[in-house]
Amino acid sequence: MAQGDFNLENEWKYLIYRLGGELYGSPLLSVKEVIKVVKIKPVPYTVPHYRGIISLRGNIIGVVDLRIKFGLAPQENKYGGNVLIVENDEMMIGALVDDVDSVMALNKDDVDLNPAIETKIDTKFFIGIAKVEDSLINLIDIAGTLSNEDLKVISRNRGVL
């Protein structure tokens, strides 16, 4: 769900997770499931944020490290955290996050759709900033943040394990 798809008349549920100490959220319906990190098989000669592949019930899924993708320091414990399984139009993708925090319902009063910030995320996939109590939460469309290059790498490696 991109910024233009955010329906302010309804309450939306977001999966809230942590990356590098910061809170992020993605539309709950875009996340198919959350799994604990399993051993990720590295694939050589790929982009730095592409961690490798996992087998999930017989499906080969490429895993992207969102910390590295967003310019944050890599996680030291490479087998800690969670993998969010998301689906775009073509395939399932794993997104490595530090920890899953909660599911949160947000309404139009909670979200600033046009914050004055600079981001590495293409703005059409940056939904906005949620203001909840004393916290600010970056709301993003995970599948949408992956570039065509990312998707090509993931697609090439789906049959490798």
Image: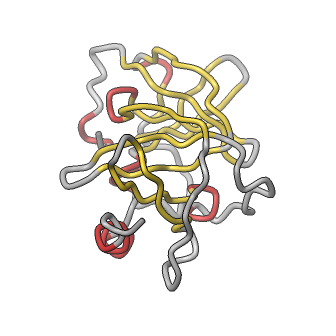
58, 152: nearer the viewer: 58
8, 11: nearer the viewer: 11
Q: Residue at x 55, y 40 (%)?
A: 138
Q: Establish if 129 lies above or below 160.
A: above
Q: Residue at x 29, y 14 (%)?
A: 10
Q: Establish if 40 lies above or below 84.
A: below
Q: Quadrant of residue 85?
A: top left
Q: Establish if 13 lies above or below 56.
A: above
Q: Quadrant of residue 28?
A: top left
**Residue furthest bottom in the image:** 45
Q: Position of residue 14 (x, y in %)?
A: 45, 25
Left or right side of 114 for 80: right
Q: Position of residue 108 (x, y in %)?
A: 40, 20
Q: Position of residue 20 (x, y in %)?
A: 73, 49
Q: Quadrant of residue 153?
A: bottom left
**Quadrant including the C terminus:** bottom left
